[in-house]
Amino acid sequence: MSRIALITGATSGIGKATAEAFANNGIDLILCGRRTEVLAELQKYFSEKVNVTTLAFDVRKQSDVAKAIQSLSDNWKKIDILVNNAGNAHGLEPINDGNLEDWDAMIDGNVKGLLYVSKEIMPLMVERQKGHIINISSVAGKYTYPNGAVYCASKSAVEAISEGMRHDLTKHGIKITNIAPGAVETDFSLVRFKGDAERAKKVYEGFEAIQPQDVADTILYAINTPDRVTIADIVLYAKAQSAPTMIHRK
Ligand code: 8X3
């Protein structure tokens, strides 16, 4: 029987690449994101390989999250894999110059959003006494770098939530995998720098960044281990990277 995965932030970057990897492995998809038209396109595209449904919501809006996930049919509610991928960085400046809206966006999306989605899905997994939750954290959750206090704090919270979930859900047969990528070439920097494409491009210059499909392959590895094994934590750096802000550029 094929597995069902729900992926948040599925319309681009790591989320979209994960959808692709899962579809290629026969895993049915519940694709979640904010952009209805993109979700519709992806549904059409992946439907050639697997069963696909979509849910449009913003993870920051708790009642929308609950309504969307509760609207799934009983069959789609048999979620085997939850990929908590939605999240972003907003701004990169000293904390004393920090922007309140940016702080809210990061704490609300990266932390509370992940919790809101999990809140709906954990009981479904507990009921079935099985499931696998993949939380996409960041190397920023392991090291705090200058100008990144709140983003790093939000990812540090993801690390703590992954550990806490593991403590509380292991007895229900649910696996938790925390994945902390370093420099992945996605729209991440474009969002962080509020559409400043020049500045965003520079982040990935002079070295080979991790590609979204590299993270997707790692997720695939984590979900395909024997049932007796939990991959608890994975850190991915670009080959030229030794810490979040330490990148050897040519
Ligand atoms: C993204 C990686 O190092 O830019 O989470 O914070 S980093």
Image (tube, helix red, strand yellow):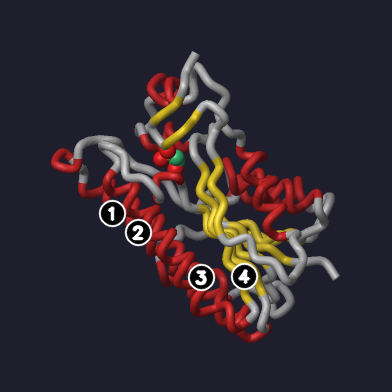
Q: Does dot 3 land on a helix, a strand or a loop?
A: helix
Residue pointed to by mark 4: 175
For ligand 1, give the image quadrant. Answer: top left
The reply to whether discs 2 and 4 touch (Cβ–Cβ < 8 Å) is no
Instruction: Select label 3 or label 4 by which is in front.
Output: 4
Q: Does dot 4 land on a helix, a strand or a loop?
A: strand
Callout 4 environment at 10 Å: few (<14), some (14 to 19), or many (20+)?
many
Residue pointed to by mark 2: 108
The reply to whether discs 3 and 2 touch (Cβ–Cβ < 8 Å) is no
Q: Could you give the CA–CA distance between mark 3 and mark 2, rounded to whole angstroms?
A: 14 Å
Query: Between disc 1 and disc 4, whose residue precedes?
Result: 1
Query: Between disc 3 and disc 2, whose residue precedes?
Result: 2
Residue type for callout 3: Ser
The reply to whether discs 3 and 4 touch (Cβ–Cβ < 8 Å) is no
Outermost residue to the top: 250
- The percent coordinates of residue 44 (x first, y second) are 75, 49
Query: Between disc 2 and disc 4, whose residue precedes?
Result: 2
Instruction: Select label 2 or label 4 by which is in front.
Output: 4
Residue pointed to by mark 3: 118
Q: Is residue 168 left or right of residue 192?
A: right
Residue pointed to by mark 1: 104
Callout 3 environment at 10 Å: few (<14), some (14 to 19), or many (20+)?
many
Query: Between disc 1 and disc 3, whose residue precedes?
Result: 1
Instruction: Select label 1 or label 4 by which is in front.
Output: 4
